[in-house]
Image: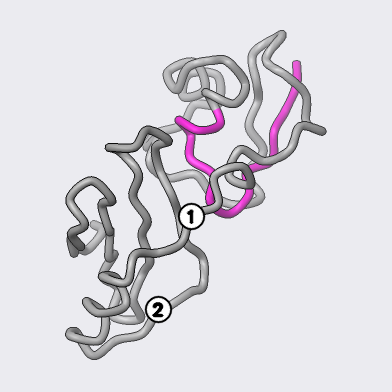
Amino acid sequence: MSTYTVVSGDTLGGIAQHFNTTTDTLVQLNKIVNPDQIFPGQVLQLPNGAGNAATSSPAAAWAFSVGPGIAEAMRQDHTTPATDEVFQHGIGPDVQWSEAIGENGVVYRWIKATNQVHRFRPS
């Protein structure tokens, strides 16, 4: 069985698509409780025939810059990014989004299709 090591910017859906499998398969195989929370350095088991660990990162092919709305929303909230990592989820033209976490603990998510920033606090 092959493995894949998660890098910054990866999503479970993106990894599944990259290795021609499904998110559900990866969730079951790796006993993932929350498919929206995978972490850089996490090693995922891939189903037989899904590829190999030497394959380049799915995130690398999806380079994506944060919408200016995130920076503006953070300025309005008097905070700055807690990290320089940016996450992108989805690859279709209507489902791309990026997010950044503010030092205030709020997640700022910019949705490309609507060009709007949504704020939420993870539980």
* Helix, strand or loop status at disc 1: loop
The answer to whether 36 appears left or right of 122 in the picture is right
Residue 100, quarter of the rendered image: bottom left
Q: Which segment did they paint magenta?
A: 1-15
Mark 1: few, some, or many residues within 10 Å (few <14, many ≥20)? some
Q: Which residue is mark 2?
A: 81
Of badges 1 and 2, the one in the foreground is 1
Colouring scheme, one of rainbow, by chain, secondary structure, one colour: one colour
Q: Nearer the viewer, residue 68 or 5?
A: 68
Picture quarter containing residue 3?
A: top right
The residue drawn where x is 27% and y is 65% is 108
The N terminus - image quarter: top right
The residue drawn where x is 29% and y is 86% is: 79
- Residue 9 screen position, x and y as percent: 53, 51
| Residue at figure coordinates x 34%, y 37% from the top left | 93
Question: Label 1 belongs to which residue?
Answer: 64
User: Percent position (x, y) of residue 112?
Assistant: 28, 51
Q: Is residue 46 left or right of residue 96?
A: right
Q: Measured along the vertical axis of the image, is residue 115 above or below residue 77? A: above
Q: Nearer the viewer, residue 57 or 94?
A: 94
Residue 48 horizontal side relative to residue 35, left or right: right
In percent of width and height, residue 107 lies at: 29, 64
